Image (spheres, rainbow, N blue to C red):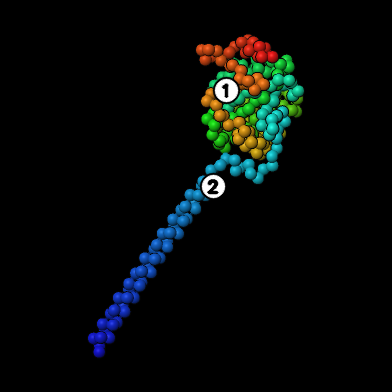
């Protein structure tokens, strides 16, 4: 009787030990699962906070700068708004060739616009390869919007500050907000409290997102120009940019 009781007690203890071990195993599995879920959520949080630069503009009202045109007013205008013809200039930030074009032909293009030959619509892409702009690119376009708006406070239709600022940004890579303000110091009359506020508070950021989405570079080579929708040559046969005189001659042949 005693031996049977002792045997039964031993079996019960063994079952109890096995049950306890099983509980510990289940607990370890649950803790491991919880740790994995926390890790995934944490990783997801990183992507959510740094994934889409456009998210920064979600809660901001859409403010469109002056001197803009197009269905969504994503092009910046230089020249007389009622000009019969339109020269569309396709350019992009961080684009070395775009910067060279501005240096070579920018003044000549604007001189013809000032004479009434056409008005210029600048379509600025945030990147050269057709991808979405990152945070620094969107902030740069926001600053360009502030420059375009600053021109409206001086002489309507002449985007002198915008053009001067654009020429600087085309040769700049990933500029911080402080750098954007420092570059604006090089453009006469651009640094004002209103301009600084627009750059620091990202006044035109929702507009910048629209610009980015509307003008992503879809062509293999930038810069490019069109006169009333027809491609206009910018380079000689050897690949160098046209001289101002040659560019003016091509324009006159189209007028």
Image quarter of residue 102? top right
Which residue is identified by label 1? 223
Q: Is residue 2 left or right of residue 69?
A: left
Q: Residue at x 72, y 28 (%)?
A: 67
- Local SS, label 2: helix
- Local SS, label 1: loop
Residue 6 in picture, x, y percent from top left: 26, 84
Q: Nearer the viewer, residue 129 or 157?
A: 129
Q: Nearer the viewer, residue 89 or 101?
A: 89
188 lies above or below 209: above
The quadrant of the rendering that contains the N terminus is bottom left
Disc 2: CA contacts within 10 A as few (<14), some (14-19) or many (>=20):
few
The quadrant of the rendering that contains the C terminus is top right
Which residue is identified by label 2? 48
Residue 165 seen in render? no
Q: Residue at x 65, y 17 (%)?
A: 109
Residue 29 in picture, x, y percent from top left: 39, 62
Q: Nearer the viewer, residue 187 or 80?
A: 80
Quote the CA–CA distance across marks 1 and 2: 34 Å
- Give the mark toward the camera: 1 or 2: 1
Residue furthest to the bottom: 1
5 lies above or below 70: below
Image quarter of residue 90? top right
Q: Nearer the viewer, residue 253 or 12?
A: 253
């Amino acid at each position: 009787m005693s031996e049977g009781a002792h045997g039964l007690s031993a079996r019960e203890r063994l079952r109890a030990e096995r049950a306890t071990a099983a509980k510990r195993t289940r607990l370890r599995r649950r803790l491991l699962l919880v740790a994995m879920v926390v890790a995934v959520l944490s990783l997801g949080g990183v992507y959510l906070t740094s994934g889409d630069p456009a998210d920064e503009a979600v809660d901001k009202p859409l403010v469109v700068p002056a001197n803009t045109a197009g269905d969504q007013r994503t092009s910046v205008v230089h020249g007389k708004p009622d000009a019969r013809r339109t020269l569309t200039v396709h350019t992009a930030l961080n684009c070395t060739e775009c910067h060279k074009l501005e240096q070579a032909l920018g003044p000549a293009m604007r001189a013809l616009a000032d004479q009434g030959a056409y008005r210029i619509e600048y379509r600025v892409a945030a990147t050269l390869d057709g991808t979405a702009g990152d945070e620094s690119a969107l902030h740069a376009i926001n600053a360009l919007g502030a420059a375009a708006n600053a021109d409206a406070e001086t002489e309507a239709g002449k985007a002198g500050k915008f053009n001067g600022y654009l020429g600087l940004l085309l040769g700049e890579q990933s500029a911080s907000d402080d750098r954007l303000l420092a570059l604006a110091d090089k453009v006469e009359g651009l640094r004002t409290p209103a301009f600084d506020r627009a750059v620091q508070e990202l006044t035109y950021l929702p507009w910048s997102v629209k610009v980015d989405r509307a003008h992503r570079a879809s062509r293999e080579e930038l810069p490019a120009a069109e006169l009333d929708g027809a491609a206009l040559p910018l380079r000689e046969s050897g690949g160098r940019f046209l001289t101002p005189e040659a560019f003016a001659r091509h324009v006159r042949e189209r007028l």
